[in-house]
């Protein structure tokens, strides 16, 4: 019997998952957590085989939690179960150590098979996520951001306007806009929010 812990900040989602798995004799649900910090304490207390992990949660997000579980020597397989399949969500989760990545619209039987496969140590990816990763592998390597582009993005991430960023870096607003446009092109995005999110997701900027 595979021991499972469910981590999700939505009680309705946790209830639904618990009902699904407790109704199948191959699985037992040891407990639930509503955020990453609760998940760390719970996994240490009950030592599950598989952790079903949401990504966007209060207190501590899923990627940080996965990274911390690995740092603490947790042997449980982590299977991400989320509604988000953007590059800025998928890649950091896989890099942090997730065994698999599924979307919440995954059918029941596929989810069961995924948990069984994760327990065996096999990688499990939803078709949409697998397609994104293959696209990343096939696409040519993008030019890295320059130090000045990172400085501009870092200030934007902290809430600075173009004018404030220009003042702090002793450059013109036009130059700030040019650096942003270059950063957008290199990151494959179209706006400031996406640029910041992608840069954080790729580890180019700190998330805090």
Image (tube, rainbow, N blue to C red):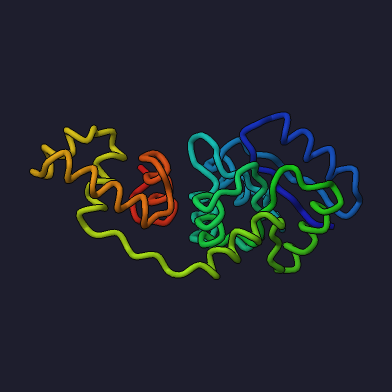
Quadrant of image for the N terminus: bottom right
- Quick check: 15 above or below 72? above
The picture places residue 87, in percent across and down from the top left corner, at 53, 53
Q: Quadrant of residue 169?
A: top left
* Residue 197 relative to residue 78: left or right: left
The picture places residue 202, in percent across and down from the top left corner, at 42, 56
Q: Residue at x 91, y 51 (%)?
A: 25
Between 188 and 154, the residue placed more toward the observer is: 188
The picture places residue 58, in percent across and down from the top left corner, at 51, 34
The picture places residue 164, in percent across and down from the top left corner, at 17, 33
Quadrant of image for the C terminus: top left
Between 201 and 143, the residue placed more toward the observer is: 143
Is residue 208 something one can see in this rendering? yes
Is residue 76 something one can see in this rendering? no
- Quick check: 71 above or below 85? below
Q: Residue furthest left?
A: 170
* Residue 36 relative to residue 158: left or right: right
* Residue 172 relative to residue 32: left or right: left
How many circles with numbers are drawn on the protein? 0
Q: Residue at x 54, y 43 (%)?
A: 36
Between 107 and 2, the residue placed more toward the observer is: 107
Q: Residue at x 34, y 65 (%)?
A: 143
């Amino acid at each position: 019997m595979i021991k499972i812990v469910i981590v999700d900040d939505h009680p309705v989602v946790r209830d639904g998952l618990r009902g699904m798995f407790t109704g199948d004799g191959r699985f037992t649900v040891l407990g639930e957590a509503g955020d990453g910090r609760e998940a760390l304490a719970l996994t240490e207390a009950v030592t599950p085989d598989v952790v079903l992990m949401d990504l966007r949660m209060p207190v501590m997000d899923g990627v940080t939690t996965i990274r911390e579980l690995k740092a603490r020597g947790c042997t449980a397989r982590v299977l991400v179960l989320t509604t988000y399949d953007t590059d800025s969500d998928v890649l950091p989760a896989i890099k942090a150590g997730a065994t698999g990545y599924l979307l919440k619209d995954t059918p029941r039987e596929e989810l069961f098979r995924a948990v069984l496969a994760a327990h065996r140590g096999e990688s499990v990816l939803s078709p949409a996520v697998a397609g994104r990763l293959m696209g990343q592998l096939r696409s040519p390597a993008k030019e890295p951001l320059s130090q000045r582009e990172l400085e501009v993005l870092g200030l934007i991430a902290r809430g600075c306007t173009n004018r404030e960023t220009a003042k702090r870096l002793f450059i013109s607003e036009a130059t700030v806009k040019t650096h942003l446009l270059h950063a957008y092109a290199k990151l494959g995005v179209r706006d400031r929010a996406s640029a910041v999110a992608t840069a954080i997701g790729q580890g180019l900027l700190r998330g805090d």
